[in-house]
Image (tube, grey):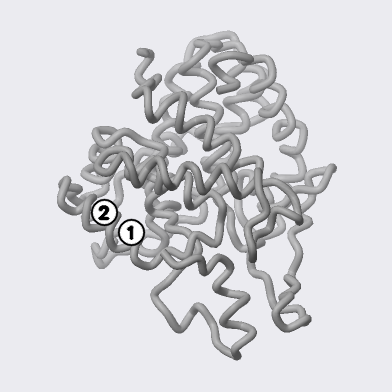
Amino acid sequence: MLTLRRPDLSRALLGYRYRRLGEARAAAAAAGHEGARFPWQSGIDGRDVTPTEVFNPRTNRWMPDHSRLQHHVGLALVYSIWGDYQATGDVEYLIDQGAELALEIARFFADLAEYDDTGAGLRGNAYTNVMTAWVLRRAVEIVALLEGRACRPLWNRLRLRPDEPATWEKISRYGSTEQALGRLDLILNAEGDSTNNYRVGKQADVLMLLYLFSAEELRELIEDLGYSLTPEVTRRTVEFYRARSTHGSTLSNVVHAWVDARSDRERSWAALCRALECDLVFVPGGTTNEGIHLGAMAGSIDMVLRCYTGLEIRDDML
């Protein structure tokens, strides 16, 4: 919404991250990696201030919080940078800030990747793996886009090695899966149990791929990784996670609203209404009294402006 209507505000939000790039580089280096690792929860100076414990009101005790282990903030940042470029065509922004952010994030995730010589393909979280492949391809595209342009200061800051774009391209193609329970982790912890003992989750990360990419774009990504993504596989994936998602994150309803818009419009609208209600009204057991979820609010607007209208900017086209 901001990029299409107020690109100056969108650019200011991206600038927030650019001004904290130094701390993100330091965080990656401290973990033994190249590039930049942005924190799950950022302090005003860019340090990771993600808490290590979360208070469980059901037991009045603190329990471990492993949120700081999530590194995918950087992937979303590159998605925003590329979306800004697609909407504005502003190459100067890429030269000044955007490319430096995107390429340092690409470096970090490329350094995280480990080659599996058994040919088993990608393992682990599908959302993070597919997004990493997408980010690395955009990094290669950005390097090609800026080649021959007057951006020597950028290359001096990055010190891009000649082999890096080829390595990114290679990694990106490695390859040969409604009861209002809310924070089920808190509920099970209060009962001396754990979500790790069940096939459930507060939200399905893999469905975010269907939110971020068109069916055609996602199919191409998956096929280049050595897998197939038929409409039937997509449908089964959606149904599998629908039965196992507790919607403990307010973003979950936004994602399900988007996914269901393709097959069940009434269910999509109901999910969107639930997403709106979480910040507009107090829901028993909800977190409204603890603060708003700005991401869910923005996602709700995105549903109306992009999903329900079919508006998309991709490949330099509207």
Q: Identify whether 190 is placed above or below 41.
A: below
Image quadrant where residue 144 sits: top left
What amino acid type is highlighted by mark number 2?
A: Gly
Residue 103 seen in the current view: no
Foreground residue, 115 or 8? 8
Foreground residue, 179 or 161? 179
Can you say which quadrant of the picture contains the N terminus? top right
Q: Position of residue 191 (x, y in %)?
A: 60, 88
Residue 91, relative to residue 100: is it above or below? above
> Which three-letter amino acid code belongs to the residue tagged 1?
Leu
Front in this rendered view, residue 185 or 111: 185
Local secondary structure at mark 2: loop
Toward which corner of the image does residue 241 lie, by quadrant? bottom left
Whether pointer 2 and pointer 1 mark residues with C-beta atoms closer than 8 Å, the reply is yes
Label 2, residues with CA under 10 Å away: few <14, some 14-19, many ≥20 = some
**Element assignment for label 1:** loop
Q: Residue at x 46, y 24 (%)?
A: 305
| Identity of the residue drawn at 39% across and 34% down | 137
Of the numbered discs 2 and 1, the one sitting upstream in the chain is 1
Quick one: quadrant of the C terminus?
top left
Q: Which residue is mark 1?
A: 122
| Category of crowding for the residue at label 1, using alpha-carbon neighbours closer than 10 angstroms: few (below 14), some (14–19), many (at least 20) | some
Q: Position of residue 8 (x, y in %)?
A: 68, 15
Find disc 2 in the rendering and name its residue.
175
Nearest the viewer among 237 and 124 is 237
Residue 91: where, in percent of width, then height? 54, 12
Count of residue discs: 2
Label 2, label 1: how far apart the Cα atoms are: 6 Å
Q: Is residue 315 above or below residue 206?
A: above
